[in-house]
Image (cartoon, rainbow, N blue to C red):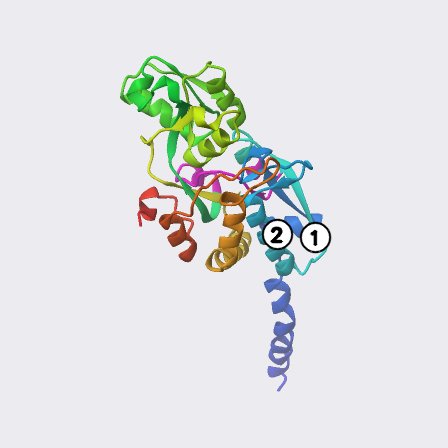
Amino acid sequence: MRLLTPLLALLVALPLAAPARADALTGTLKKIKDSNRLVLGVRDTATPFSYLDQNQKVVGFAVDICLKIAEAVKRELKMPGLEVAMEFVNSSSRIPLITNGTIDLECGTTTNNAERKKQVDFTNTHFLTATRFVSKKDQHIAGLDDLRGKTVASVAGSTNILMLIKANNERRLGITVIAAKDVPEAFLMVETGRAAAFVMDDVQLSVIAAQSKDPSAYVVSDETLSNPEPYGIMLRRDDPAFKAVVDLATADLYRSPEILTIYDRWFLKPVPPRGLTYNVPLSSALRWAFAHPTDNPDPAFYAH
């Protein structure tokens, strides 16, 4: 009996210790709990994904998704009063601000690809897009070959500018590539004649053209520089506990009818501040991705 007494004491103590280990937070969840703050990286000009409305409030399709994730984080941490803060990012700053801990989620138009996954992680795909270019109709620019020797704009730090440079080199087009800080600046170069075309994700080209003074003056190319590519909400790498919360929240949302309501609100109905309707119907590939939530970065995976 004397030998059994220490063993019995240990067995009694084990259940008391186990919950402390199970409840121990790490990574982003610990950071959020300790600071009582979840920080979303947002855009001011990525209409209709993440942008400022007439009241200088950050709104958009990706913002709505991130706010749903924030609600899930509040429930996970049992912190209903958790502060949800927003920090502006751009194409060049978004990855550094994720990796250095300034922001916890990036809510915008970031392409999920294998190269970026070496630095950051992504949750389930929330949009699919292909790289095209916009130009003025009166320039009669049908394809990339018509841009030979001309000046073409794209956004610094985007996958699109890399595709433009690659096509330029491979096809020896002699294009002068200009890197703009964001979508509005690049489109302005086309408006003012400083660039013959602007290469970007097709949905963003359709949106920026619709916002222009004369939408009928512009055309988005039929020719693409890429297969359809997935957008994902970005988060830090090697943080399985936080990613599990985010993945579950987005999977539940995308499988529910609510995602169609959110999609319609931003792509098929008038949106602030000007009441424009962008008329970007839900593609069959994106409908499939919503029904089968995935963070797969391979464009070929979405060919449905």
Q: Position of residue 16 (x, y in %)?
A: 65, 72
Q: Position of residue 64 (x, y in %)?
A: 58, 48
Residue located at (57% from left, 42% from top): 60
**Where on the picture, by quarter, is residue 150?**
top left
Residue 136 in the figure: left or right of residue 252: left
What numbered label is drawn on residue 70?
A: 2
Q: Which residue is mark 1?
A: 82
Q: Amino acid at mark 1?
A: Leu
Q: Looking at the image, is 182 positioned above or below residue 21?
A: above
Circles 1 and 2: CB atoms closer than 8 Å: yes
Between disc 1 and disc 2, whose residue precedes? 2
Q: Looking at the image, is 141 positioned above or below residue 107?
A: above
Q: Main secondary structure of the magenta part?
A: loop
Residue located at (44% from left, 24% from top): 217
- Of residues 250 and 279, the one nearer the viewer is 279
**Figure label count:** 2
Q: Amino acid at mark 2?
A: Ala
Q: Magenta segment: does it hold 256? A: no
Q: Looking at the image, is 92 positioned above or below residue 13?
A: above
Real-space CA distance between mark 1 and mark 2, rounded to the nearest whole angstrom? 9 Å
**Where on the picture, by quarter, is residue 196?**
top left
Q: Which residues are the magenta region?
A: 97-120
Kind of element beneath mark 2 = helix
- Of residues 138 and 207, the one nearer the viewer is 138
Q: Residue furthest left?
A: 171
- Of residues 32 and 151, the one nearer the viewer is 151
Q: Position of residue 32 (x, y in %)?
A: 65, 49
